[in-house]
Amino acid sequence: MVAAVALVAVASAPAAFELAPATVSAAPDTLGAGGEYHPLAPARIYDSRDGSAVNELSPGPKPATPAQPTFDIDLLGVGGVPDRPADVLAVVVNITVTEPTAAGWLNAYGAGASSGLASIVNFTAGQTVPNLSIVRPGADGDLTVKLFTQNVSATAHVVVDVFGWFSTSNNADRGARLVPITPGRLLDTREGAGVPLGQASSVELQVRGATLSTGQVLGAGTDIVGVVLNVTGINQQADSTGTFLSIAPELTAGVPPSTSNVNLTRGQIKPNMVIVPIGADGSIRLYNHAGSTHVAVDVAGYLTTTAPGARAGRVVPLTTPYRVFDTRETQWGAVALGPGQAEDWSFADFVNSVRIGGEWVGAQSAVIGNLTSAELKRQYSTVAVSSYLTVYPSDQPRPNASNVNMVEGAPVPNLAIMKYGAASTVRVFNLAGFNHYLYDASAVVLDD
């Protein structure tokens, strides 16, 4: 199972990218609810920590060693996910690594599948790092979690929260379709009066009918049932402390959320992608647990029950995450993206290579996967650097939005929807320093 993605102006031979046989067919009249999203109330479905264990009979840290040890957790029949494998194509989970004793990475894939070279969460010692992911259950409904560090005695805890699932064509209940858009900013608490979110406080964000920084206007109808956000916590206030952010359609006064979307230490800037249902009033709520923090919210897409076409908006997961490119490697140039620079990536070979049972899945509007800033280096040796990456369609102006924020010394992962521009091409912009980055695809969004 191989695939090819070419940097613009760099030749690349097409290759076959095979998916495991699935119940989603390429024939429009047999797709049914295939690839449609079903939101759930956020729920914790796994926690390895002593004292707060969930679905773990032997609580305690998991080994994370050069041997890449694995363990399995249940994906089906927990947190509201149906228990029938024939109904569930993929599950949307937030996977958090916490209390790692060494730097490393985590990958997750359907039990019984081959993992390949990819990562979902990258972490350093002592960090708490969450990342949203679209994962495909194994034949038995389980998810295999793999942990790696270069320390033979290292350990880490793992926490998994579920937010929704994608149905197969066998499922009788229709879900929502995903419409990717050019990223646009919905909120930045630094603007205007610049008031951060205080301790145990929340802000209400109107989504239906909202105008984004790009000028795009979201639909105001009740058919817009969910939104895909990139939420960045900017925890650099004088009174800041460690905190977490939660995004939900509704909040109960005086009752803190039971799950988190972004975990922040003092002085940190960190993003995480969120898929959240929209409340009955057309809004969502953003909650800050402790201290005070600024927040930026960018919209990457929305979920609608009005089908944009026979195939458009259906999400088809890959069998396992697939390493599409890594700018550190010679086959992709081995050149870091410089300060204030952008470069284009053509996904044409990739689009033409995604198949189910040997049959091409057809036109695609976007790819979903993990974008990781692998290494950021200074432009000037005596000047510290921080930066961000923005990904957008190559035929659109650069939006006021970001996908990954990073500083020197640590890799930073974040799920990203790459909406294609002309000729299936996307553009990546780097603000400052010299940035090496990689992309692991986990799903594609179909188009008509």
Image (spheres, rainbow, N blue to C red):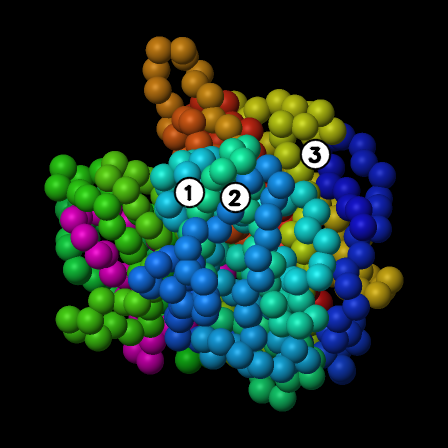
Task: Classify residue 40 by image quadrant.
Answer: bottom left
Give the spatial CA distance, label 2 vs label 3.
Answer: 34 Å
Is residue 219 visible from the viewing direction of this image? Answer: no
Which residue occupies 42% across, 42% down?
100
Kindly check if marks 3 and 1 are in contact, taking CB atoms under 8 A apart as contact. no
Kindly check if marks 2 and 3 are in contact, taking CB atoms under 8 A apart as contact. no
Which residue occupies 30% across, 46% down?
264
Instruction: First in sequence, mark 2 or 1: give its number.
Output: 2
Left or right of 4, for residue 213: left
Question: Which residue type does callout 1 highlight?
Answer: Pro
Front residue (pair 168, 285): 168
Residue 7 circle label: 3
Q: How far across and how far down the image is residue 136, in percent?
A: 63, 64
Residue 100 circle label: 1
Left or right of 385, for residue 321: right
Q: Is residue 381 above or below residue 325?
A: above
